[in-house]
Image (cartoon, rainbow, N blue to C red):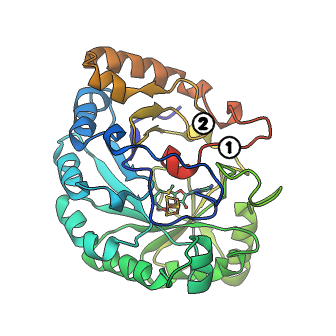
Amino acid sequence: MPKIDYLRISLIDKCNFRCQYCMPEGAELNYVLNQELLTNQEIISLLQGVFIPLGFTKFRLTGGEPLLRPGLVDLVHEIAQLPETEDLALTTNAFLLKKLAQPLYDAGLKRINISLDSLNAKTFDQIIGNRGGSRWQQTWEGIQQAHQVGFNPLKLNVVIIPGLNDTEVLDLAELSIKRQWHIRFIEFMPIGNPELFGDKAWIDSAYLREQIRQKWGLVESNIKGNGPADVFQIPGAQGTLGFISQMSECFCDRCNRVRLSADGWLRPCLLNETGQIDLKTALRNGQDLAKLQAQINDLLLLKPEINFKERDSGTDGTYSRTMSQIGG
Ligand code: SAM
Ligand code: SF4
């Protein structure tokens, strides 16, 4: 088992997009009330008093859409300043990134992952559930701005959905050739959207790789991340292609992360709710941090048993909570 030293912190469960695979229409979304969100100060107390002493050094801010969180730049600054922080990253849809990229970079954020499922404005709007004017251009400008201020590596996350954007695999992969951009294809997971895409909504990474291999060739890359992606490269390309294949291949035995939800629940696994701990209530009730640390340590020791394989899904094999609620 790898050392568990990576905490994904969800800052908010609300979002300015409604991606079909993440917050599908009809899904019951009971947003966390503002007073139930962990405050910046509570997040820092948990990092200093609990997670860092347990050996956590890598943090990723996510959501919902983290750029909607008030006080985000200050929080980034505070986490970046902690001497134990080895890695601080953020995952965003980039819609608000044009203005925020520079302040976030200056505050100490060095790595960013951006979700971009299509280069076609119409398809993009369809995927993100947009009914007003197109949101593609502003998102693209956010990505360009992140590139310009110097975020490196810059990773683009793509979820390929049959019938929606599966004809764009090569166009999206091509973005890795001339720029040092890392495109990561994530297999769609049936979370919070049981009926949405029928029996098989996801496409195996192996099939995507085959399409790319036939067009340009594909080799394993020397550049590896610290996450679950299998990393490849088009020969001669500046960037890489990552494949996160949680549906076709189980990678639980490589998992080095736990998740903190926006309302303070610690989850040992994305799809398995066993053993969750309510850190917000503990903190607000003045529970001793050393005791909390011991409780979390016990949960970390149990983590190898708590994984996708043993997931406690509904009887139909799907999950009621959406990714935006869990904090993807
Ligand atoms: N709003 C931000 C964004 O979209 O990048 C951060 C939160 S989002 C929940 C984090 C990641 O989860 C995104 O890359 C998104 O594509 C992915 N995601 C959401 N729902 C998913 C699903 N059902 N299957 C696979 N990936 C999903
Ligand atoms: Fe929002 Fe991100 Fe979910 Fe899309 S994937 S609805 S951008 S939280």
Q: Which residue is mark 2?
A: 253
Question: Contact, CB < 8 Å: mark 1 with mark 2?
Answer: yes
Left or right of residue 69: residue 160: right
x 66%, y 56%: residue: 26
Whole-Å distance between the Cαs marked 1 and 2?
A: 8 Å
Q: Splitting the image into 4 quarters, where does residue 126 fall?
A: bottom right
Label 1 neighbour load within 10 Å: few <14, some 14-19, many 20+: some
Q: Is any part of residue 3 visible from this angle?
A: no
Furthest-right residue in this view: 199
x 70%, y 83%: residue: 215
Could you tell me which secondary element the residue under label 2 belongs to? Answer: helix
x 31%, y 69%: residue: 151
Residue 227, percent across and down?
49, 50
Residue 61, percent across and down?
36, 51
Could you tell me which secondary element the residue under label 1 belongs to? Answer: loop
Left or right of residue 120: residue 16: left
Q: Amino acid at mark 2?
A: Asp
Q: Splitting the image into 4 quarters, where does residue 71 fall?
A: bottom left
Q: Which residue is mark 1?
A: 250
Left or right of residue 240: residue 313: right
Residue 187, percent across and down?
66, 58
x 72%, y 43%: residue: 318
Q: How many marks?
A: 2
